[in-house]
Amino acid sequence: MTDTGNHRTTNTVHGDPETLVQTGAVHGDVHITSRHARAASVPRQLPLPTKGFVDRGAQLRQLDTLTTQGTSPGVPVAILAGPPGVGKTALAVHWAHRARDRFPDGDLYISMHSHAPGPRAQASQALDTVLRTLGVASDRIPLDLEGRSALYRSEVHGKCLLVVIDDALDPAQIRPLLPASSGSMVVVTSRSTLPGLVAREGAERVLLGVLPLTDSMDLLRGTVGARVDSEPRAAHSLAEHCAHLPLALRVAAERLIDRPDTALIDLVEELAAEESRLDALAEEDELSDLRAVMTASYQGLDPGSARFFRSLGLHPGPEFSVAAAAALTGVSGTGARRLLERLRRANLVERPRVDRYRLHDLVRLYVVERVRAEDGHDAVSESIGRLARWYTHAAARAQLAEHPHFPVVPGGEAPQELPDFTSLEEALAWFETERTNLLAVTEAAFEHGHHETAWRLPASVYPLFEVHRHWHSWRDLHTVGLRAAENAGDAFGLARNHLGMGDAQWLLGDLGAATDHYESALETGREAGDPWVEGFALRQLGVVAWQRGERGPDAVGHVERSRTVFREAGERRGEAMSLLSLADFGADLGRWEEALGHCRTAVDAFEEIGAEWSTAWARCSLGRILTGTDRAWEAVPEYRAAIAVFDRHEDADSRSVALLGLGEAHAMLGETARARQAWGSALDYLRDHDDPRVPEVEERLRALDI
């Protein structure tokens, strides 16, 4: 600003701006464009604090002291360690809410699910979620752990954040999630004392034991009320039976609330009787008293609620929706929601967010025991089968919303109350939420002998894994699918899963493994009489051979034969895909007119059948051919139309290919600034994913400045 009195100019900057403009005078407008896709709001991810939290004064003071280290080099890390059920998460969340105003840039809550059933959260998976929360566009998120961790540290540099990492198993899960600049703080909960994190990162351990008797009484009193003071000896005995574990005490208190006319001594006697049936575990299992408490609560449920509750323990994923719970338990969606809410109020089920439920890991251990003891193997298998079929049909619907021409094979009659996806965005969001469950359910279906379902789920949804670059999970999914199809003796199932596995290995760069699976898909596809598999296996064999530099007649012959198979089967999209490959081959050899004819025919076919994503890919090939024949002005709108489709499908890989072609067209037209913008956007993505094309694109950008 300028001081008009003495004509001195001073400059003041507040915050951490990405762009500055300094000038003496401005006439007209100043336009500043950020390179980031969107600005992230301040994250506030802490779950609700536990009602009736008691004491833990020493630990709270220890955490408060750690926040004063924020001005010192490094990031303070606190480890809340103790046995299961002792209240580690409750303490972390309670303190974090109390300390929120000390962290103006927000708070992140990351659950690693180390002691929950189903796949354990890995640091790479957690970082993917966190980076998206921080506003990082999906096409900028690297595939590898090291790249994601580095990007995360860059994104949070200079910020004052509170990071809560819940239920961690070992330091390897935690280290990639640690900020590197002072001002932030990390709170970790774990059953382990994590000595490696203490030794290397200087973390401070905050140990939690069971509650003292006075705090146990306060917890009961805050929930049950005056009944505790009217029966002090019974209350003391109740706390003893609960081992002074906060979780067990809360379950017992809820039991008393449901029975307002029951004396505390009656519940104490029930618990004593339950405990006697678990003598074998009493001396060696830390959960023995908790089992007794939960048995008392469980026996207070009506038969329908009890059956529903114990069936929930069979869900193999970390959390589930109301609809999935309904499928698993065989009740209606309305009934499932009512029962889930009843169990939530009884502290037997948690609701981490809207329409998502989970069981505390200790509760799940208990109900799994109960379902095995009371329902038997056949009932357990039947429940898993219902759940797997529901997920297979629901995922097939999501797949058709993303790619309506992909031949899903869910099999059998569709279950009731499947999700309706009114938009592509809804389907993609559902898939991201349920992705971990899809793999866990496939594995569970296989383990319980539902082989037909276990191969159908992978065969019906794998393009969703392709679009979002979940290629390793995609490969794992087909590993189960192939075993299931082999056990079922189903040639069609083998063919579909070999084809999908071939695509996964191809994208992961293992061309040898891809070729093996494509050859197996071709053989089993012919055995099953499936021209769709046969055609795409032939096409991909030709594409992989061409990619390896085999430019002879064999590669072209594979694709020509695939075109014939598709044409005879009336598979128009497949035939157009074969034409598109022939167009690419022709462009590689400089046979431009031949390539242009194939490509325009493919575009027309895709448009006629409404294959939006395939049309976009064909437009990229068309743009390349038009640029190669000195018609770059015609190529530009083709690339832009393709980019719009890839953005809608959140297909960052394909978008980068289109951007490279768009930059080439602009460069040929002498539009240097536009070429630099397109190549620069593509380069950001390629660098984040360690793509081998990075040096080539960097060289193109340098050449623009010559």
Image (tube, rainbow, N blue to C red):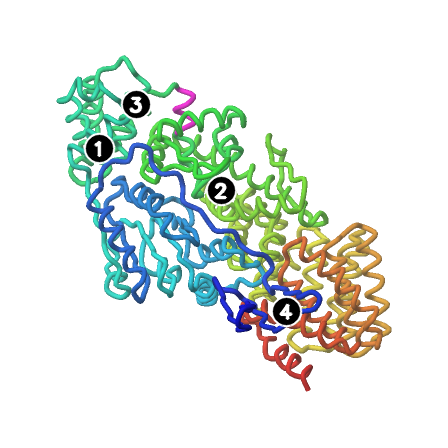
Tag 2–tag 3 contact (CB < 8 Å): no
- Looking at the figure, which quarter contains the C terminus? bottom right
Camera-near label (4 vs 1) is 4
Report which residue position mark 3 lands on: 255
Separation (CA) of disc 2 from disc 1:
33 Å
Is the C-beta separation of discs 2 and 1 under 8 Å?
Answer: no
Dot in front, 2 or 3: 3
- Residue at point 21%, 45% (across, down): 208
Where is residue 273 drawn, in percent x and y? Answer: 20, 23
Q: At which x and y percent is residue 216?
A: 20, 32
Q: Residue furthest bottom?
A: 706
Q: Residue 475 vs residue 594: left or right?
A: left
Q: Earlier in the sequence, mark 3 or mark 1?
A: 3
Pointers 3 and 1 in contact (CB under 8 A)? no
Could you tell which of marks 3 and 4 lies nearer the N-terminus? 3
* Residue 465 lies within the magenta run: no
Q: CA distance from mark 4 to mark 1?
A: 58 Å
Q: Amino acid at mark 4?
A: Ala
Marking on residue 289: 1
Q: Residue furthest front?
A: 5
State the extent of the magenta-drawn residues as a range. Answer: 303-309
Majority SS type along the magenta span: helix
Q: Is residue 307 magenta?
A: yes
- Nearest to N terminus: mark 4 or mark 1: 1
**Left or right, residue 90 beside residue 462:** left
